[in-house]
Image: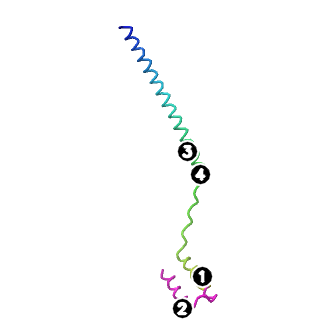
Amino acid sequence: MPGLLRGVARTAVVAGTATAVSNRVSRRQAGRWSRQAQEEEQQYYDQQPEPEPAAPAPDPMSVKLEQLKQLSELKAQGLLTDAEVEVQKSKILNS
């Protein structure tokens, strides 16, 4: 029986050592893969172009002036009557 017990103990030690080594290798590989994935992700983001800054919103007064100019051009071309121009002008100025 002592020989059997010694064999079981030896097997347990070998199996425990193998498990510990295997776990250590697995953790090291997972760490390498994680670092590699982070590096690849960083390279991807480094290659992305910077987004264009948004154009500033136009000044409301300049928009109204532009609309009034267009309105006067339409009147000069004969496409609008004086009454139509006055109605549209009041809409633009009151908005």
Amino acid type assigned to the residue bearing label 2 in the image: Ala
Residue at x 55%, y 76% (from the top left corner): 63
Q: Is residue 7 above or below residue 55?
A: above
Q: Earlier in the sequence, mark 3 or mark 4?
A: 3
> Where does label 2 land, which residue?
83
**The N terminus lies in quadrant:** top left
State the CA–CA distance, disc 3 to disc 1.
51 Å
Residue 27 point in image, percent of width and height? 48, 31
Q: Earlier in the sequence, mark 4 or mark 1?
A: 4
> Where does label 3 land, which residue?
41
Q: Is residue 79 above or below residue 47?
A: below
Q: Earlier in the sequence, mark 3 or mark 1?
A: 3
State the CA–CA distance, disc 4 to disc 1.
42 Å
Residue 13 point in image, percent of width and height? 42, 17
| Labels 2 & 4 near each other (Cβ < 8 A) | no
Secondary structure mostly seen in magenta is helix
User: Furthest-top residue in view?
Assistant: 2
Residue at x 39%, y 14% (from the top left corner): 8
Amino acid type assigned to the residue bearing label 1 in the image: Gln
> Where does label 4 land, which residue?
48
Q: Earlier in the sequence, mark 2 or mark 4?
A: 4
State the CA–CA distance, disc 3 to disc 4.
11 Å
> Where does label 1 land, which residue?
70
Would you say residue 91 sits in the magenta stretch?
yes
User: Furthest-bottom residue in view?
Assistant: 82
Kind of element beneath mark 3: helix
| Labels 3 & 4 near each other (Cβ < 8 A) | no
